[in-house]
Image (cartoon, rainbow, N blue to C red):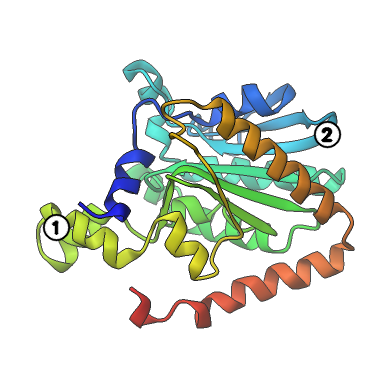
Amino acid sequence: MSAVWDSVSLARHAKRPLFLDYVGQLFTEFDELHGDRAFADDRAVIGGLARFNGKPVLIIGQHRGRSTRERIAHNFGMAYPEGYRKAIRLVKLAERFGLPVMTFIDTQGAYPGVGAEERGQAQAIAESIATFSSLKTPIIVTIIGEGGSGGALAIGVGDKVNMLQNSIYSVISPEGCASILWKTAEKAPEASDALKLNADNLYQLGLIDHIVDEGEGAHIDAKPVMKNLQQLLSEQLDELQQKPIDELLEQRYARLKSFDSTVGLDSV
């Protein structure tokens, strides 16, 4: 099997740290905020106020759950539209009070059920991307496991985008891509190579800013990973907070526009 397919397997490893594990290790005084003020509180997306190195921040992440009971409660990390509307509400709150935003991505994708579509799944994702792109406060994004399609991109627009060494980030899952191209999910390893969805490839393409070293792997020993990520986030936060907001917004927009020329059809 290829190194890219190995990354897919490790990104999905059952013992890999989840969003709430990072919350417990990197942040203090976490105060979760609930609901989208329109329909429900989506437990696939968790967010709230916290302190990072003593500084107030707003954090949002997708939590997949570990036990069967927990995974069902969090819908396996696949958000409904109300999850993205909750994210929009929270980041607007952060903007109002001048708080930097940190997001943590770990999802197969947005939930594709009928109810989600009826409640405006695509619109919620689009509105979230638009809100993040123009948010007048620093945003740092970290892919900690699996970053799938628009469900990940909805909270993935930022001034800095990081990936853990064994995480993945793609427009579609390898199985989904293989099913479309070869009519069988058994070609997923080949599809993962074509998608170039691991951290090394995405860094070379200029789509992410930093790869967080995992050492033996976050699923084996999470402590050095947490330490490396904490140091990186601290450095990035200090850097971003020194820049004028207008400059941040210009660079964020230019970054998004550059993706059209960075990733052409020949790259996938």
Of badges 1 and 2, the one in the foreground is 1
The quadrant of the image that shows the C terminus is bottom left
Q: Position of residue 243 (x, y in %)?
A: 87, 61
Q: Quadrant of residue 179?
A: bottom left
Between 81 and 251, the one lying in front of the other is 251
Picture layout, residue 258 above or below residue 82: below
Q: Residue at x 10, y 62 (%)?
A: 183
| Residue on which the image places disc 2 | 56
Specify the farthest residue to the front: 215
| Residue on which the image places disc 1 | 187
Between 184 and 231, the one lying in front of the other is 231
Q: 18 left or right of 253?
A: left
Total marks shown come to 2
Q: Amino acid at mark 2?
A: Pro
Q: Position of residue 87 (x, y in %)?
A: 62, 43
Q: Identify the secondary structure beneath mark 1.
A: helix
Q: Identify the secondary structure beneath mark 2.
A: strand
Q: 127 left or right of 193?
A: right
Picture layout, residue 18 above or below residue 67: below
Q: Residue at x 57, y 54 (%)?
A: 156
Q: Residue at x 67, y 63 (%)?
A: 133
Q: Quadrant of residue 227?
A: top right
Picture layout, residue 56 above or below residue 158: above
Between 193 and 56, the one lying in front of the other is 193
Q: Does residue 267 appear in this view? A: yes
Q: Residue at x 37, y 77 (%)?
A: 267
Q: Amino acid at mark 1?
A: Lys
